[in-house]
Image (cartoon, rainbow, N blue to C red):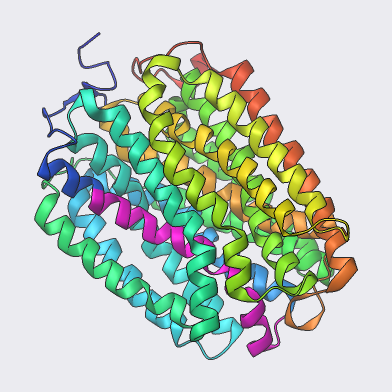
Amino acid sequence: MSGPDHPRAGGASADGGTPQPRDAGVALRSAAGRGVLLTTVLGSGMAFLDGTVVNVALPAIGGVFGSSMSGLQWTIDAYLLTLSAFLLVGGSLGDALGRRRIFALGAIAFAGTSILCGFAPSIERLCLSRALQGIAAALLVPGSLAILRSSIRPEDEDAAIGTWAGLSGVTTAAGPLVGGWLVQAWSWRAIFFLNVPIAAAVVWGALRSVPASPGARRRRLDVVGAALAALGLAGTVHALIEGPAHAWRWPSWALGPAGVLALGAFLAWERRARSPMLPLSLFCNRQFAAANAVTLAVYFALSAATFLVVFELQRGLGYTPLASGVALLPITVVTLVLSPLVGKATPRIGYRAPMTLGPLCAGAGLTLLAHAGSATQGPLAFVAGMGVLAVGLAITVPPLTSAVMTGAGEGDAGVASGVNNAVARVAGLLGVAVLPAVAGVSAGDAAGGPTGAPLLHAVRTALLVAAVVCAAGGAIAWLGLPRRERPAVGHPAVGRCW
């Protein structure tokens, strides 16, 4: 199948313009192809790594600043909040002004805000710096996959996306190990300074290997949509984090409903906006909609589980930061080996089977982890649980990424990538905000909450809930994904498909 409506040949622009033909691209195995792949993996991997490397340092940060659990939740969620709210703007900026330009600018801004995080004198300043860091990441992340897809020739696209997803996943999974080593050998501040040389490599690679794209300058930026999304997420998450800690006193009881109303206004605005940052018509494609629903379930479970397991290891079982990072190592090893193989097999086996099996397997791994902290279990129980979880993630992520991108036209590559990344970050944002409260982890205790047996029980409850949510993602994939890839066929009016 070929033609402008096929997702690998081109597609309509999000603003309703004419389809933009795709260049032939370079071979993945060529020097140019490897340069593009390495640059995009480093760029997205730096932002993804920062989302996990901080987790293992949270107990140390809480000890230095005397922070409550809610303060440490904000250390994670301040980053995810602005990243989620502005990812779609970042994707639109790349499509409008040139993806290489915005990608390099994002890397420079990420390095600068990482330095601010490293020198933060208080938990409040750290959270503010993390929010600025999330804005920088919003310029960096969506351009990564969009650049890869537009630069690599169509016949290598699935292999390239699978390799990108696998290597980016490895950088994410390596975060706890790298963070544990840096915290134990130097200081928690070193985890932020690590981003500076990586960002320099990304800028150099972008200027040397990534082809320049002129951009479609007629696309407007959706400032109103971005503001409504940021206000809605901020109000909702503030209520979820601070409400349990302060018995739902002011302003938590007011900000929660206000945030929900703002999110509703955001959807209403996006439906009517001339140039929306979230084209709701994309969700008329069943494959695109189902893949994002699976993303929401899997990343909700994964982000909350990663956040709490670190506390279980360090504050419940007495692990050092480095030892807790080593306990999470199976995710790195399994993802590195298995994800590229799954990516290469995706064109033959389709999306539905691996995206059903993967979340179910990941849910089983979370169930094993829920029981690994009991007195009768040892370190091998964590290794087994992490191994099964890693297999599930490695099976899920490469076809999921490919399903999202092929469900949208080439002209919407940046927006589609931004939507899926935003869904993943919103899922993590909500997971970190919701599951600690569900599990009964106190938000008022100094230096991060309970220890010992109470913490082990709370984390077990949260992991079991996460396992159920993850398994639900597998059910969504089975029921919602078509048996075979369905190419994008334009963007009908929302009212015709809703």
Could you tell whether 147 is left or right of 483 in the image?
A: left
In x, y percent, where is residue 57? 58, 75
Asked whether residue 278 appears in the rendered view, the answer is no
Residue at image position (72%, 59%) is: 379
Rendered position, 160 above or below 255: above
Q: Is 380 left, or right, of 276 in this rendering?
A: right
Q: Residue at the spot x=30%, y=48% of the render?
A: 144
Viewer-proximal residue among 20 and 266: 20
- Compared across the picture, whether 263 is left or right of 166 comes to right
The residue that appears at 11% across and 44% down in the rendered structure is 32
Percent of width and height locating residue 96:
22, 45
**Above or below, comparing residue 110 to residue 493 in the picture:** below
| Extent of the magenta region | 38-67
Is 50 in the magenta? yes
Compared to residue 68, the image places residue 480 above or below, namely: above
Q: Main secondary structure of the magenta part?
A: helix
- Residue 284 position, x and y percent, is 48, 20
**Quadrant where the C terminus is found in the figure:** top right
